[in-house]
Image (cartoon, grey):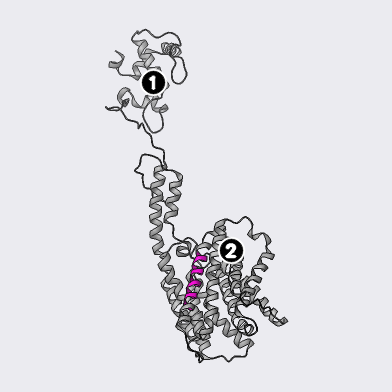
Amino acid sequence: MRLLPLSGTGTSPASPRALADALSSGMLSSMAVVPAPRPLLGAVLLLFVSAAWGSAFPLMKDLILRLPVEDLLAERYLIAAVTLLLIRPGCLRRLSRRTWINGVVLGLLFGVGQTAQALALHSLPSAVSGFAVGCSVLITPVMALVMFRSRAPRRVWAGVVLAMAGMTVFTLLRGIEDHEVSLLALGVTLSAAALYSGHTLMLAQLSGTGERFPAYALTVIQLFTIGMLTGVFALRGGITLPSSLPDWVILAHLAVVSCALGFLARSYGQKHVPAVPSAIMMSSQPIWVAAIAVIWFNEQVGWSMVTGGGLMAVAMLLALPERGAAKGTPDRSGRRDLLAVSRRAALVLADLRIKREDRLRFEAGPAPFIAKSACRDVEACPWNAHALKGGGEPSLERLIGRATAIVRAKKLPGPGCCQSVTLVGRCLCALMEESEQTRVAAVEHWFRSQQAE
């Protein structure tokens, strides 16, 4: 960011802290103005998250027939947290209090959303519940605009619309089973979707801190928080564990692949993709659910799968940031904010410059100078060859020498020997003795007759 060369108006220098405050106070959140430096890597990680979470739906649908949903949630998140902690035992050491607070808040946002969605699922058809949760792709840009004043580009909004259309085709248009829809349960599920959107926005804002973003530690803290939160509801009726090896294999997949690796990939993926595009990419979970249903459960491919999958594929292409968009390149609204910050920083930098209290003042009257006409022959003047570069003034040594010659020519008494020393370090007496050895004719040749008189 180049600072504008503005001059300061104050007289007292500002402190460097003022410069830092001026810069930090006008900076936008990273998820608002920072496009992805490596969008392909971020897209691959987020698509893995979507596939990992999408694979959890049919497996959980089968496993909750034998395990309570509260017990299943608590077990999978606690196992995921312990797995990541065993891989890196020292990841939670020397963490700042801010990191712990951010991790707990992220875990509460997602954990409360998971619990609310699970409790409301008993009063909603699965298609309606899936559509309500999928509304987070629309809630995310709206919350970003309201909370952070982050305006998504038009093509990203087009991706949001296409993602919602694909979600509608995958859920509502495929048919709703004969189940009564509870408005209270629908509102709770939409609230869970809003919590998921807040989780996405907060994670995107934290990931904009660059190398200081502790993605692994935040993931472990989140998983422990979600596991303990859901464990509170599971402890009411006692914890039920899987009773067969296939159920343990399913639980291991849900914990390690869907939770541990999924949350970890999401934390690193959102470092490269902003919040709204990441929400669009993670909304492709119905595509993976449908693919798993076709491959593993022999479900027939229908027009809704093809149409909904095509709409979501186009939405993801529109949401993918451009490769050439470097990190730190602002959008139109971001440029205005950065210009305002640069102006404030320029003023602070101008005040930091040292100012003289006693400014130099020149005396009234014209500045002294030596006219070129002081020589009979201008080209033969000695100082023309020995003057400073860029001016016609003689050197100090020759000026003193010629002044001494004039004094001797007028028979004026000189000072005591070496009582005066020139600025160049030579004795004035020596200069006067040297001038006596010069010829008067040379003096008359250098100066005009009226000066020699």
Residue 408 percent coordinates (x, y): 37, 10
Helix, strand or loop status at disc 2? helix
Tell whether position 202 is magenta: yes
Q: Are dots 1 and 2 in contact, CB under 8 Å?
A: no
Q: Is 7 placed above or below 211 here?
A: above
Write down the residue under mark 2: 218
Identify the residue at image location x=46%, y=46%.
17
Residue 280 percent coordinates (x, y): 49, 75
Q: Is 89 placed above or below 57 here?
A: above
Which one is closest to the eye, mark 1 or mark 2? 2
- Quadrant the N terminus occupies: bottom left
Task: Mark yes or no: residue 322 visible.
Answer: no
- Quadrant the C terminus occupies: top left
Provide the residue span drawn in magenta.
Answer: 189-204
Q: Which of 266/370 is in front?
A: 266
Q: Main secondary structure of the magenta part?
A: helix
Tell whether position 91 is magenta: no
Write down the residue under mark 1: 399
Check disc 2 and give the amino acid type. Leu
Task: Mark yes or no: residue 123 visible.
Answer: yes
The Cα–Cα distance between marks 1 and 2, rounded to whole angstroms, is 79 Å
Identify the residue at image location x=43%, y=76%.
158
Q: Which of 301/54 is in front?
A: 54
| Mark 1 closeness class: few <14, some 14–19, many ≥20 residues within 10 Å | few
- Farthest residue to the right: give it: 245
Residue 343 percent coordinates (x, y): 38, 52
